[in-house]
Image: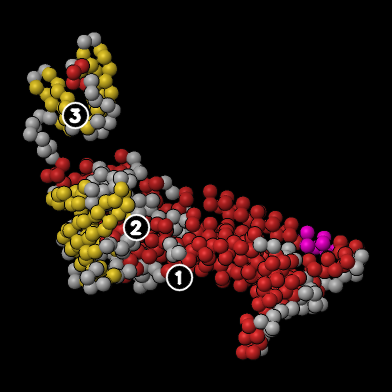
Amino acid sequence: MIETAPIWLTLKLAFLTTIILLFVSIPLAWWLSRTKSIFKTIAQVMVSLPLVLPPTVIGFYLLLAFSPANSFGKFLEHYFDIRLAFSFGGLLIGSVIYSLPFMVHPVLSGLSSLPASLEEASYSLGKTKRQTLFKVLLPNIKPSLLTGIVLAFAHTIGEFGVVLMIGGNIPGRTNLASIAVYDEVEALNYYNANIYAAILVAVSVIILFLLYFSNRKLQEVKIL
Amino acid sequence: MIHFSLQKKLHASEGFLTLDVNCEIREGEFISLYGPSGAGKTSLLRMLAGLMQPDSGFIKMNDEIWFDSEKKIKVNPQQRLVGFVFQDYALFPNMNVEENISYASAKSDSKKDIDELLEITGLSGLRDKKIQTLSGGQQQRVALARAIARKPKLLLLDEPLSAIDNELRATLQNTLLTIHSQYNVTSIIVSHNINEIIKLTSKTIHIKNGRLVEYQSPAKIFCNKSEDPSSLKCVFLSAEKSGNDYEVSILAGNQVITINCDEEEAKDLRNGNEIEVSFKGAKVFLRKL
């Protein structure tokens, strides 16, 4: 029989990545949708980079950065007693960077599609930027937020290259379901590989189905 | 009293336009802002509301300074107590009618204030309705009620009735008048409709290419200023040959009328040309303006 730990670890990673991405992506997408700063283009490139780079490349550089042999890793270990290479924390940071465009892009397109007058109306009604964001802007881009959440979650479940580079395959700490499939195949345990793979397929199908179904419902509410 | 002098370089469709308007409005007055599209009317309202930064100038609202480029004072839109009715209404689709209005009101306001506002704007029966289910006229009322719920010192209306048919327009004009007399708020409305301007407002700011050309009562601005009082300003629509004469269709106000004239009078005119029509005896003369 298979170990269930990799499945739970995968779900935990996807859940935490999604939560962190929500906090990071909403302010970032809001800034991108409004700014005319010259840093906008640089920020857009950085956000979209994980879409085009091979995951192993991102994983490789993160591994170098996290390594205690290099300055950033040394700094973390020396001052905070944290070692990110081959740890769950490292996986989490890698996943957040790797799935960033999947959350930022839907939220950004949602915010850009709202007329500027909604935000301006809220300001001229005496509301702060924060109140405007939470009471007017975000409630009106629910489908985009949902798309971002689901894609980030699903994309984290499907990670392989990045997590293999940063996390390796330490049972209970960095051994994710996608890596378990690879491991089982290498050990010629096709039956076990099949179970892990089937679970991943099922989870992904359910998540995407829920996304499209609820977005359809939200659209219908909007039309009525 | 509100006194402002505002200058700003704007990107217009035909290159740059420098908006430069200096004006004083008495407290409680209802003013109209009139001028061709692209003259800077909306930009002027946006600067008063604090949604657009002027290059230079000042805005004084009674004793408060809302903007002064020399003293580097700029009060946020949040602190200006301006009610702004946007051309697209800018209602919040995630809230119902009552929520849109109560979003604007201060915490200290009672439910009674909101009820009163719903009553005046004729929205009492629609308070739980979603914004998307309302007609254009109803949305316009919600936008107006929301702007008033803010208890503004200045009410700015950016072509609020332009997308509404004539019959409903008259009703909504009456609502505007009721609100103005009830809350006695200094108001500025952008409008292209002369009838509306005369009905609602006591003075008109006429701007053209970013400059204030006239600031006086609308009746004076829109009265026939041509030397010949028997002439009318119209728009040429079309001409058709009928016998020896030409049958010419022209738009006078909101009415299309047909008159007969010589070929000589009609031959150089094209659809949309502004013309002056004068009558001498039985003869009609058309002159391109």
B224 or B274: nearer the eye?
Answer: B274
Give the residue type that dot 3 points to.
Answer: Lys
| Residue ID at (13%, 26%) | B278
Q: Secondary structure at mark 1?
A: helix
Q: Chain of mark 2?
A: B
Side of B200 relative to B282 (left or right): right
Query: Is residue B52 visible in the rendered structure shown here?
Result: yes
| Circle 2 residue | B145
- Residue bounds of the magenta highlight: A195-202
Asked if badge 2 and badge 1 are on a common chain, one would say no
Whether callout 1 and callout 3 share a subunit is answered no
Label 2: few (<14), some (14–19) or many (≥20) C-alpha neighbours in 10 Å: many
Q: Nearer the viewer, mark 2 or mark 3?
A: 3
Q: What residue is pinned by disc 3? A: B288
Mark 2 or 1, closer to the camera: 1
Marked residue chain, label 1? A
